[in-house]
């Protein structure tokens, strides 16, 4: 093509770009608030539902007690390892509370408390960490996916499940939990992208507890907040005080509602703090000072709620005592459950590798059986 | 386990390509079972870069045959979630090397989920992987990556070598309650044979090898893209006075030891042939196991004719890499006939 | 802790959240403009540098001719396959032009033109697609990484290289190219995150050409624009008209300058269009209609520049003819270069697997050598 | 190739753990060569979850020993770029199964870059992977994934079994111009021996197996975590009247065929022992190759004692999985002694 052939050549022109290049959606509504959303200690607390808040309180106290008991069990050698959620109980519990019966929870390895708050027997929730099997429950029975140790890998599962349910016309929302560190994994990215493209009914809850083992958030990301990552997928990002269970409950409920109504996924960053070491095997003094921990003690999720509720007369001494008693009962039952030696059957090793055992596995099972019999005879 | 109903028999087998048989297998599975969903890059509107999913989106809609975003871990990871909910995803990986981004999902979840949940949550996912070379593809398009799959307990690893098996084994894979890595030999996509899609004789189960040619001198053990080469070698070997038996494994996991062992005990000699690199390849397991079980029947060590232990070569050099008739005959000649 | 023990219990209180939870940076400056940045056909064109623009023009014409020649070579069986960049020449060429000698280019499999524009011999750039070897040049000599076929995998390489150079105190910027489809891969996410955390001197250039083979952008992402993804990493996102070489040059130059000055990475989305099929082996009529292609024809990168420059008297018939002659000379030399049968040595297969050949490879090489000798004798 | 200078000899070997020897190897390499950079999750301030990088960030600064974001493909991918620029990255993968997200980078770039560029751009990257079980770890923390690495041409695969080798082989790996997957047997991290870090006798090259115990009855071929088990088995075998030779491979790639073949030709019997699953595991290659080269010297087929072909078990069941002394002796007993 030469200049001469071009219509309008020689004249200054304003080419109209093809329609395809306009932004597909408005970014503004996707952006999170500048500060984490809070309810407790703000005027929004005037609207608290007393019954709901009393339930939250009881669950928080139970959750804290669960954490203490699980850590105690590691000391007694009853658990191989335990990643505590002390300080993060509001996130764990709100996540479980906002789901309906038919919804699914996708916990990370840290989130046994969320599973317990959803109603799972604590002993079953802790099976992985006790070490008698990998997953201690039937995921379909409880609609709780197996605790996921490979970080962020559970997120695409949640998307796929939610998408499948929607395709089948079922009313199911999936809530997937991940840590601040887990947001750096490729699976985080791919899951959020698929969710947004498919408008799958999923809620992604990032617990930003400040650390990935020893690595602080500043070495993990340079993002303004983790909630800002939502924009790049075309879903709304919400930033919320993860120690404020009233705020957590509200924001999660709203996201679940949106998802259920066909409004697509939401990314929620809950700002919280891991009060204890990464696990009982970790030594947090190697990478963080007391001052930071102390600052967060003043922002404890149980204290925040207890102050608000007592100040408003929603909770009294009797209520507090009742919550503690309930928590103690749960702890005692957990202790008893874990003190019973689990019965393990070595032959289970070969039972669930394939639907039908292969010849090869049959042979190996026979070898092990013969060994065990020989041992028994010795 | 979904039942694979044999379709009403219709006579009149017509020439069909392996590609067509694969497409037909998915189509029939989707028609029979609404939980079967096909997903992957370009599988919808385009029908796949090899056109194996051609027509499925049109017939069953985009929700049943879905163009996904370009992210293999995401594809397999969401397929896991779909299978958790009761669907039977059939995932296409566009080329062998592009399945690698999905390896964490494959090794840590897909292969293990049944085991991790004591059988409560099996994952009936079929992962279709076009594999191998011989089509002049550039780097990352010609890998034979079966060694990785074979070494991963929990995966079933299937690979057809004929048009008929392409249909039957893919049907069986989709119907399997276990995750199946279904390796499609891309250079056989356009291989043809007379076949009637309406009456797949009987859909074979997974795990049975087939003696494709009987013989008495030695056994060639092979699968997928190397089967035609071995059959050709067996023909050529007649001139040298060798009567070769050829076993097509059809699935690497489960490995049909009995069929192979019976053949080798009969012939007393064996060569394993595959395109994947030799070192740590599937042929190593086959040779080791066959030797273990046929030791006193063997006149010579089990030999292997495989790809070299190098990255897959560029198009202009691949002919030097691929195990061909000559190399197979050379190996047969080294089976200590003088003894 | 009981209510009684808490200071201030009973009184409504406003807990001060720990400092850690404030957004780390202001998101606003990271957000891309609402519309792609343009220069040609706008008032900004008054500031064009005539010499630079004439060079751009010559390069564009050469680039278009290169594309035509490469496609012709596929028809003659001289190239196994060719992914054309017709319509995307402004992106390819600007990417090469803005780099200094010591900078590095990280092309995707489609970006042979960018490598050629950086000075690489076209025959070397096309080696991969001709099939006589994988990479046809010494990456260190040209500071052009191998063409990357596994999508997005080159992005972390660019980050690592730029980071290494900065650690060593060298003045090196890495410019990495990726397609719209490639942004969905986990490696895209991980690379951008590492770059931002390390403040590595990298520029990420996404050519949004509307398709990943057959998959349109709408099935790839729900983001407002791909440039919005920058926000989630804490780097600026820029949206630019990828067919406007003046705009491309300006935006890329600015990003390279920032990176060089220690200002960290930038993500640039260039909105453009793949005018031809995915490769010569693809049939684009299966997934897109003529109307869309026609709309983009009116926004051709060469036409846009040619009109602007001729209208302003910066380019005349002589200049156009000179550019074309230069392009024809390049095409003739490329044709000649590709018509010579490449000399391949089968023994090369074993030459570069390890620094020292292993015994096993020596044995395999000997076997192949013997086969070849036997063939020679036959 | 960076020269590994033998440090000035100092007398006075002291008890040291394998963990300490590994730390020391990185320290010495970093001190000698400013291009050596350590990177990974928690390797800096914390010194790694196993404390193998303890003190390196303090001594060399965070730019030389870097806590990366949590993304294994990103870690290895950026290491590729760093190596392209002339650095020698030493990457830590926190546990075996967490190396899987990096497999595409490993298989498609790390292993092939030298080849793809005709030798112009080798990648001297060391990838440290703590592997194997026996430490009561939960799922995804105990995989023996060497089969994947072994089947990937272009990778060197090294695994020490002694304190001394931990130092020497890691030094040699870091000095290698090829990418090395350095498999650290995590249950030997706290194994001890008298060793002087100041005077590593001589840093061994990669690719030489060692006869750790001479014997005449049969050869145990092993590596990494299974070496101590084999030595123990060899002791126990004396009571049964067997005098076992034990070969420690030290590297799986290159595989020191000569040392192994010489031993097996001498003893006439062999058992390969490793913790990884048997099917398609490294033992298959070793058995196949040894048989090929020692066929007429063998009194019995080469047997394998390996992990079962199942996902790694939960902590309370791992003792049934791990190849132990009894299982090795049982295999030795099956070596057809009556012949
Ligand atoms: C893919 C993968 N890489 C590494 C690990 C090892 N690992 C376990 S927990 C952890 C830190 C996780 O941090 P974060 O995501 O913030 O979750 P948190 O522990 O704070 O709950 C790491 C690196 C893992 N489990 N999975
Ligand atoms: C990891 C990976 N998956 C799949 C492919 C196959 N493939 C080659 S090009 C392509 C589409 C790429 O689209 P885009 O990133 O938009 O780049 P474009 O082709 O438009 O330049 C696909 C899926 C690949 N090369 N790498
Ligand atoms: Mg965290
Ligand atoms: Mg594109």
Image (cartoon, coloured by chain):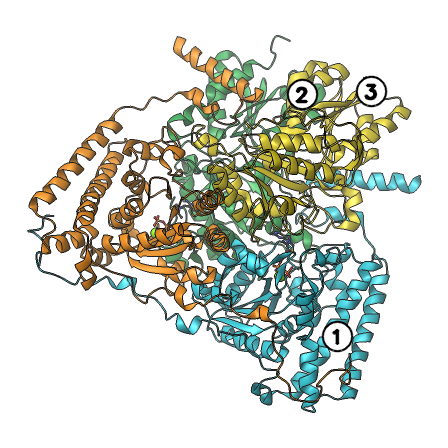
Chain colours: A cyan, B green, C orange, D yellow
Query: In which chain is the residue bearing label 3?
Result: D
Give the residue number, with chain letter if any, for mark 3. D337
Cα gap from disc 3 to disc 1, whole angstroms: 65 Å
Q: Residues within 10 Å of mark 3 (few under 14, many from 20)?
A: few
Q: Nearer the viewer, mark 3 or mark 1?
A: 1
* Mark 2 C-beta closer than 8 Å to ligand 2: no
**Residue at 69% of width from left, 70% of height from top?**
A294
Coordinates of residue B249 in the picture (x, y in percent):
57, 33
Q: Are marks 3 and 1 in contact (CB under 8 Å)?
A: no
Q: Earlier in the sequence, mark 2 or mark 3?
A: 2
Give the residue number, with chain letter if any, for mark 1. A62
Helix, strand or loop status at disc 3: loop
Q: Are marks 2 and 1 in contact (CB under 8 Å)?
A: no
In the image, ligand 1 is in what quadrant?
bottom right
- Residue D286 found in image quarter: top right
Give the residue number, with chain letter if any, for mark 2. D291
Q: Give whichever of A313, C298 is nearer the camera.
A: A313
Coordinates of residue C250 in the picture (x, y in percent):
28, 55
Q: Is residue A369 visible?
A: yes
**Residue at 93% of width from left, 40% of height from top?**
A377
Coordinates of residue D233 in the picture (x, y in percent):
83, 30
Please give left or right for residue C282 compared with residue D50 in the image.
Answer: left
Q: Is residue C273 visible?
A: no
Query: In which chain is the residue bearing label 2?
Result: D
């Amino acid at each position: 093509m030469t200049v001469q052939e071009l219509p309008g050549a020689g004249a200054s022109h304003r080419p109209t770009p093809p329609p395809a290049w306009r932004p597909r959606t408005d970014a503004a509504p996707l952006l999170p608030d500048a500060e984490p959303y809070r309810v407790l200690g703000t005027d929004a607390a005037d609207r608290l539902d007393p019954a709901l808040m009393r339930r939250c309180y009881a669950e928080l106290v139970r959750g804290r007690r669960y954490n203490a008991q699980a850590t105690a069990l590691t000391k007694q050698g009853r658990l191989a390892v335990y990643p505590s959620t002390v300080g993060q109980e509001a996130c764990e519990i709100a996540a479980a509370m906002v789901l309906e019966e038919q919804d699914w929870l996708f916990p990370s390895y840290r989130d046994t408390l969320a599973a317990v708050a959803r109603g799972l027997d604590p002993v079953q929730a802790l099976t992985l960490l006790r070490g008698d099997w990998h997953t201690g429950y039937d995921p379909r029975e409880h609609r709780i996916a197996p605790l996921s140790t490979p970080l962020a890998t559970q997120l695409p599962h949640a998307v796929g499940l939610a998408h499948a349910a929607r395709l089948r016309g079922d009313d199911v929302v999936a809530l997937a939990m991940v840590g601040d560190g887990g947001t750096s994994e490729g699976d985080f990215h791919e899951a959020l992208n698929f969710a947004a493209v498919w408008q799958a009914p999923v809620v992604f809850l990032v617990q930003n507890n400040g650390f990935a083992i020893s690595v602080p958030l500043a070495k993990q990301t340079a993002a303004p907040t983790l909630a800002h990552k939502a924009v790049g997928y075309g879903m709304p990002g919400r930033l919320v005080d993860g120690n404020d269970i009233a705020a957590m409950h509200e924001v999660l409920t709203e996201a679940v509602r949106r998802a259920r109504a066909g409004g697509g996924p939401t990314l929620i960053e809950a700002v919280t703090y891991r009060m204890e070491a990464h696990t009982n095997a970790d030594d947090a003094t190697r990478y963080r000072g007391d001052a930071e921990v102390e600052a967060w003690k003043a922002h404890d999720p149980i204290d925040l709620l207890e102050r608000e509720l007592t100040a408003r007369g929603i909770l009294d001494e009797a209520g507090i005592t009742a919550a503690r008693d309930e928590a103690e009962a749960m702890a005692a039952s957990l202790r008893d459950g874990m003190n019973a030696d689990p019965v393990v059957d070595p032959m289970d090793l070969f039972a669930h590798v394939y639907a039908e055992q292969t010849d090869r596995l049959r042979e190996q099972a026979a070898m092990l059986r013969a060994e065990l019999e020989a041992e028994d005879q010795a | 386990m979904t039942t694979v109903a044999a379709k009403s028999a219709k006579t009149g087998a017509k020439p069909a390509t392996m590609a067509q048989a694969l497409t037909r297998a998915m189509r029939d599975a989707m028609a029979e079972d609404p939980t079967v969903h096909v997903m992957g890059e370009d599988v919808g509107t385009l029908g796949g870069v090899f056109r194996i999913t051609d027509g499925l989106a049109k017939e069953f809609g985009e929700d049943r045959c879905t163009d996904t975003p370009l992210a293999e871990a995401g594809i397999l990871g969401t397929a896991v979630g779909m299978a958790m909910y009761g669907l039977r995803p059939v995932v296409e990986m566009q080329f062998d090397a592009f399945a690698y981004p999905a390896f964490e999902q494959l090794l840590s979840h897909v292969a293990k989920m049944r085991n991790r949940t004591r059988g409560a949550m099996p994952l009936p996912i079929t992962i279709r992987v076009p594999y191998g070379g011989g089509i002049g593809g550039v780097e990352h398009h010609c890998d034979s990556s079966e060694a990785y799959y074979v070494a991963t307990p929990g995966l079933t690893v299937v690979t057809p070598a004929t048009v008929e098996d392409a249909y039957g084994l893919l049907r069986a894979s989709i119907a399997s309650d276990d995750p199946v890595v279904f390796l499609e030999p891309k250079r056989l996509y356009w291989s043809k044979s007379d076949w009637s899609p309406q009456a797949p004789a009987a859909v074979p189960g997974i795990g049975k090898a087939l003696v494709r040619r009987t013989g008495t001198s030695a056994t060639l053990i092979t699968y997928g893209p190397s089967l035609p080469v071995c059959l050709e070698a067996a023909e050529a070997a007649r001139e040298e006075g060798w009567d070769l038996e050829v076993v097509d494994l059809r699935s690497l996991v489960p490995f049909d030891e009995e069929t192979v062992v019976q053949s080798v005990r009969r012939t007393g000699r064996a060569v394993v042939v595959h395109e994947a690199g030799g070192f740590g390849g599937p042929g190593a397991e086959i040779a080791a196991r066959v030797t273990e079980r046929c030791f006193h029947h063997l006149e010579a060590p089990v030999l292997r004719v495989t790809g070299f232990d190098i990255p897959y070569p560029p198009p202009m050099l691949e002919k030097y890499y691929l195990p061909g008739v000559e190399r197979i005959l050379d190996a047969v000649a080294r089976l200590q006939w003088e003894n």
